[in-house]
Image (cartoon, rainbow, N blue to C red):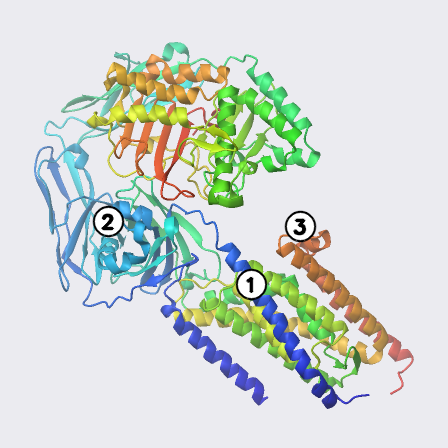
Amino acid sequence: MPRLTGLLLALVLSLLTALNGCGGGSGDGTASTSSTSTTSTATTGTAPAISTQPVAQSALVGASVSFSVVASGSATLSYQWRKNGSSIAGATAATYTIARVTSGDAGSYDVVVSNSAGSITSSAAALSVSTASGAPTITTQPVAQSVVAGANVSFSVVASSGSTMSYQWRKDGTAVSGATASSYSLSAVTASDAGRYDVVVTNSSGSTTSSAATLTVTTASSSGSFSSNVTSAAQSFLATLSSAQQSSAQLAWSLTTARHWSNLPAAMVSRNGVAWSSLSSTQQAAARSMITTALGSTGNAMHLGWQMADNYLYANGGGSSYGEGQYYVAMLGTPSTSSFWLLQLTGHHLTINLALNGTYKAPTPVFMGIEPKGSFTYNGTTYDPMGTVRNAWSSLGAVLVTYSGAKLSGTYSDLLFGANGSGNIDGSCPRSYSSVTTHGLLYSSLSAADQALARAVIQAYIDSQASEVASELTTAYLSDTALASTYVAYAGSGTVSTKGNYFRIEGPRLWAEVSVQQGVIFNSDIHYHGVWRDKVGDYGGQCVG
Amino acid sequence: MASASAERGVGRAPLDRLTRWLVGLAFGLAAGLMLAGAAAAHPMPESRVWVDTRPQGLQLTLQIPLNRLELAFGQPLAAQADRVLERHSDALAAYLLQHVGARSAAAGWTALRPTLQVTGEGAAAELEATMALRAPPGADPRRLTLMIDAVVHEVVTHRLQVFLRSDWAGGQVGAPPRPLGELRAGRYALPLDLGAAATANGRALQALLATGMAHIAGGVDHLVFVALLLAVAPLWPAIGHWIGERPPREALRHIAWVVSAFTLGHSLALALGVSGLVMLPAQAVDVAVALTIAVAAAHAVWPLFGAVEGRMALAFGLIHGQAFAGGLATAGLSPAQTVQALLAFNLGIELAQLAVVLLVLPPLLALVRRHPEPARRARVTLAAAAAGLALGWIVDRLGWLPAPAPLAWLDAHPAALALPPAALWLAWGLSWLQGLRQPQPA
């Protein structure tokens, strides 16, 4: 069949042409490329090679230490030293010197040597630091905790020294009998266990005392009428739904299902529950009534305001991925006055996880982002749903810049613990709060007037909830013991109007962050991402390690 | 009765126009859907690192949002994404060389200067850097620690998600990327153990062959289309209806020609799709595939294409090949690997298709000769069923209505497609037994 042979030849030729055209198969990735510009790089010379690697060192605190590398390669060589894998600012010569070593300098050092053709990574060299006296050095301090009575709790410390260490935990300055390991666990705590705990670490050369960590013990939630009111409002709402709608609205409880919320529009990351757009006006009225019962009138007004903000985005170029219809109502578990269930209200920029009959009364995690950034008018009504929270942060930010200890290093372009799990939903549980090593400034270091501003921020979050929830949160977040281990922090310039700025308040239970970001629909303006978590009360206390 | 050659003379011009029109319609539809899909992109805030294995090490493709990179790079980038390369390509290459590397045990790897592209627009604009990492002599290139602190040495909230995109030696090819881990502030090193490498190409090619076969075996729509081509293979076209059967040799030659044309069409489209020269949105391609089935069903009742059946098969093959291309991911493969992947995957498709032909053709040829009238009725029934399916697919794939229940059932139970060929063999068997008792007149 000569015709077929000719066609096959054409196929092979076109295939080869096609492959030539794709840039030598240099992995076009999976991103759709709307506008692409390429640089073709003429690589000259060869990548560097290392002839002498940096070597491990040990030093006493206060001494000087140098790491060196010898490398060869064409053209000018650049050096970047790293500690534990992270580039050290300014450490860009063949030798890196630490003039006065501190215990914090201990770690693994290496260098990347590069020229215009490529780079090479050196082997790692450890720096071990010991104190002149030889007494232990505490590298991880015990952290403050808050639990309900009956729960278990554990404090731990990490210390280093050249010789064997022993530990003695103390409560309010008094040694606790038998508490002589690097961690100390209390089971079934009672109110009398509350107090300040520290540990004395001793070796043959001396001893070091850790900082004190406060243990707060709260009583288990007393149940007023809140749980039964929300339950009956939820049942009334469910009764207005068709059976198909009910099966979407009411899901089995699981932490995995509960974590399925996002800060992206529902059109991009699906949500649990029934869509507002699928509800008739009667059903919406029943939902509205339930939300008012669950969140109180302030919280309900916020929920409505967030829906209107999305309508505003729809009308101003966002299109049908946005809008009040894309907010969802879900119940995880069966609404009940006695057993655990979760009311999840979620949509693009607002998610509330109100736990009923759990170990804790908390609406967290709460995602509170917003675009447009401030007050807006939709259908003749003006809304500013995040106004109270934003203004409270704004006042606090204005004074925080006067405290150098409140400023965090690095850049915060988004939240640390937002909905940034795999698939852009809420991530693993509980968040690794212990991975956060810089906390900013203790509340107690603020002036009395500025302490009031910090309390106002916390109060703004609490006030978004119904009174029975708010009352429990007030004890948990604003009691003297809680405030004694509460930190305030910021990154950037301290205003709520500049992209890249960031704020945080962190207590034994509270975790609240706000990030000022580039707008998406109004992309020459800013918008906010914010999250409010409760280290133990998230998802009603079902999310603990 | 008109002769075959006379028919060709009459039929060619208008049918050629019809073919052109149908193909034009399919591609027009595809283009329209592509424009609709380009709107409304929400930027993804993380960076992605795609890992492709190479014999001497790894090839990394980093996709970093410019509005995050600029915070660490120290120069504004996102505001004028189109001028980033012209202004900063040397500095960006140097930055990446200092912040991306690897080590095996104590021995550090070499990284080669990346090639850079800027993709996307506005808040979605990203730097895409492709760089080779080479293991030092004596080190295992499949057991290493990836060390990256690009962006995250400064941006505390940023994350780099690392995926294994292709691993030819490990047999991971043509499949969705596999997540390897995440790098972020405080976690700048990711240990990777990719296991032992296969000694030959066998593992990857085997996987691709199986993927190709599974692709057509699970693609109910492609099977239905092939069945429709076969249904009319033993017949002669006349204007408006099918007449008499072709002699067996002629029928075989004809079906070989039509199936080859279909194969040529989809191989060509597959090559174009995989090479990235022609990229149509999956939805548009799926709708066009359903359209081809509707047209082929009509053709099985009234010969629309007559003597240009081969050309129809070629044109429709081009459309089906676009759909096949969606089943083969070749990003990150070297050019030689891409060619091999394409051939293995296509071979898998051909084998599965050939199996269908061999399964259906022998009883079909026999039955059409012996029982022309029941065969005609069976053919029209098949065409009607296929047309129904095609309409269901079109409506479903355009998102107008959810898939009708029979369609959803069929998608979930593709094994049910074995019933028609089984019925053919059964009918042939019965007819053969009947023939034993009363021999057919010649």
Using the image, name the chain to which the residue with label 3 belongs.
B
Mark 2–mark 1 CB contact (< 8 Å): no
Q: Position of residue A528 (x, y in %)?
A: 38, 35
Label 3 or label 1, whichever lies nearer to me, is 1
Which amino acid lies under the numbered mark 1 shown in the image of this protein?
Ala
Task: Depth check: give the residue in front, B122 or B407.
Answer: B122
Task: Depth check: give the residue in front, B219 or A415.
Answer: A415
Using the rendered image of the protein, determine whether residue A265 is visible from the camera's viewpoint: no
Q: Is residue B103 above or below residue B352?
A: above
Using the image, name the chain to which the residue with label 2 belongs.
B
Residue lying farthest front? Answer: A380
Query: Residue drawn 60% across and 78% down?
Result: B261
SS for callout 1:
helix
Identify residue for label 3.
B402
Q: Quadrant of residue A108?
A: top left
Q: Position of residue A184 (x, y in %)?
A: 33, 21
Residue lying farthest top? Answer: A192
Q: Position of residue B69 (x, y in %)?
A: 30, 48
Identify residue for label 2.
B75
Q: Is residue A432 left or right of residue A438?
A: right
Mark identifier at residue B30:
1
Query: Residue drawn 26% across and 44% down?
Result: B153
Task: Depth check: give the residue in front, B223 or B282.
Answer: B282
Q: Quadrant of the N terminus of chain A?
A: bottom right
